[in-house]
Structures are given as C-alpha cells and as structure tokens.
Image (cartoon, rainbow, N blue to C red):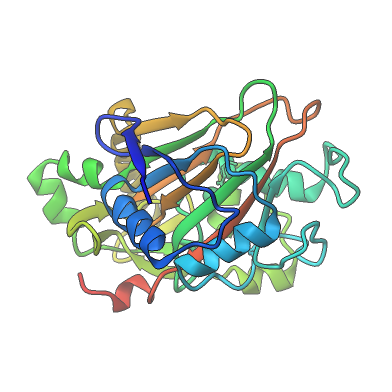
Amino acid sequence: MNLEINPLHPVFAAEVIGVDLRDPATPELVAAIDAAMDQYAVLVLRDQQIDDDQQLAFAQAMGPLEPDVAVVDAARHRLKYRAMVDISNLALDGSIVAVDDRRRMFNLGNLLWHSDSSFKSTPAKHSMLHARVIPPSGGNTEFADMRAAWDALPIDTQTLIEPLVCDHSLIYSRALLGFEAFTAAERDEFAPVPQRLVRRHPGSGRRCIYLSSHIGQVHGYQRPEGMVLIRELMEHATQREFVYSHPWRLHDLVIWDNRCTMHRARPFDDRRYKRDMRRLTLQDSAPTLDQAA
Ligand code: OGA
Ligand code: MN
C-alpha cells in the first residue's frame, strides 16, 4: 500500500492518492486512513468509482454506522440503504424536486455551519460523502477546523466556555431559516439533547469547540444571552484562516471528523442542475457528556 497525502490547507485537510475503494479495505488501509483522519480531520479521496454497496462496505470497515437518517418525511427514501443519507435535490423518480418540496426546505439547513448529528445524544464521528452527480458550478462544501479555532481563543474565553453544556436540535437550526413545519412526531423525535461545548479530540489529544447551528440553548444562561455567545464563537470559528472550501470533482469521497470540524454546503442553481451526493456516517462512542472532558 502506497498512500500519497497532500495537504490542502495550512491547518487541516488533505488529499489522499493511491486508494481504490472498489477493493475491500484491508486493516492496513483502515489504520492509515484513521491515522490521517486524526491528523487532518478532512480527507479527500479522489476518483472513487464506487456504488452504494462498495461505499457501504468501506464505511462498515471503518467503524459502526449510524443506523438511520434523521430527516423530515423519512418514509420517502430514494436510496437502497436506510443508513445512507440522500444529500441530493432529487425526487424518488430521479427528477429535480419541486421548489416548494418540504424536504428541499429542510435540506437548505445544510447551508448553515453544523456538525452532523450533534442533535443526537450519541452524535456522529466521521461522515463520508461521495459525489455521484455534481452541478457545473457552485455547490462547494466548506469545512472549519474547531481545534485551530480553540487554540486561537483568548484564554479568558477558553476558561469561560470550557465547562458549558448546550442543547442541540434540528428544530433550532431549521428555525434559523424560518422552517417550522415539523409534525408532532418529528418534534418528539428531534427533541433537544445536551452536548459539551468543549471537547477533547481523542485521536490528536487537542481541544476543540463543539459548535453547530443545531444549538438553541446554553445551560445556565438566559436564552438570548447564551445565543449571543454562540454567535460570537461561530464568527470566530469560521474565519477564513480556519476554513477549507472543497470544490467537488466527480467521484470524490470526502471524509470529515464531526467531533472537531464544522461544515456547510454552499449554494448552486438547484432548480436547474442535479447534485447527487450520498453520505454514510460513523457513530461516536458515547454522548459527549459521558466522554472525558
Ligand atoms: C452533509 C452535508 C454539505 C453539502 O452531507 O452532511 O452537510 O455540501 N453536506 O452537501
Ligand atoms: Mn452535514
């Protein structure tokens, strides 16, 4: 095995050359990807001409998967596997969804900075997103390094936020865009969960700010007071020096570590062009409150 790793940004993110995921992943490959993930937090594996089964086999070799997707209208699923998240603007028949489609409105929440599944009590570890169809322009995905963001905080801010706990919910992130059309069952399913605001990233030993647009409340703070603090941290953490913007090439597989990065989709002409991305997600080991501080 001969992996070439080329950094894509001064503080994190790298491109990996020399992997073909059509072949079953060996323990050596899994270990090499894991080690590179711990260092770079975002990896771009170029030119992976894989189908759903091969994407699933690789993800399963990397670790336990999140069993199910958390979306509105979950019964309407376009893909073969329930665990595969449909990050596309496509309807069941493969055509572009209607402009007023509820799922489209909901998916626009991906344009906000977030960490996947921070609204689940045991959140996500790695996400693996594969590009099947890309639009002619736009539609980058941006990543922000929450370890670099922590390192750059003034010490008094680090001390202030270190013990804090926040509630996360899909309902909070969608409310930021004015989307409130959840059913009673969805409101139950997406009830807020608590997460630490500061974590230690086990693979690198570094501290990171665990931010996400799913945050809607800071424990011990008046709600607007807490949200002002979260906004300040968001602005700090998404300064350009901490951000890598990924221009997709067809068949890129991008893996990111949700424990120590945030990401967001960038706009494209989604009424005219198709974009079909498919995501599998590894589950973290425990709720953040049960993990070592
Ligand atoms: C995701 C996500 C952003 C994008 O797959 O979790 O947020 O650019 N994707 O599609
Ligand atoms: Mn996401």
**Quarter occupied by residue 11:** top left
Residue that sits furthest to the top in the current view: 137
Q: Position of residue 191 (x, y in %)?
A: 56, 70
Quick check: 293 left or right of 70? left
Please identify the residue farthest to the front as the structure is shown. Answer: 1
In this rendering, the answer to whether 144 lies above or below 191 is: above
Quadrant, the C terminus: bottom left
Residue 57 percent across, percent down from the top left: 59, 65
Q: Is residue 11 visible?
A: yes
Q: Position of residue 123 (x, y in %)?
A: 45, 67
Q: Residue at x 51, y 38 (%)?
A: 46
Residue at 24% over, 47% down: 147
Residue lying at 76% horizontally and 50% vertically, measured from the top left: 103
Q: Is residue 71 left or right of residue 101?
A: left
Quadrant of the rendered structure where residue 134 is? top right
In the picture, measured across the screen, residue 44 lies left or right of residue 135, that is left
Q: Is residue 280 left or right of residue 106?
A: left
| Numbered circles on residues, count | 0
Q: Work out which residue is located at the far right of the displayed protein and give it.
A: 93
Q: Is residue 137 above or below residue 64?
A: above
Towards the viewer: 140 or 190: 140
The residue drawn where x is 66% and y is 26% is 268
Question: x and y percent of residue 87 in the render?
Answer: 67, 48
Residue 222 seen: no
> 153 above or below 226?
above
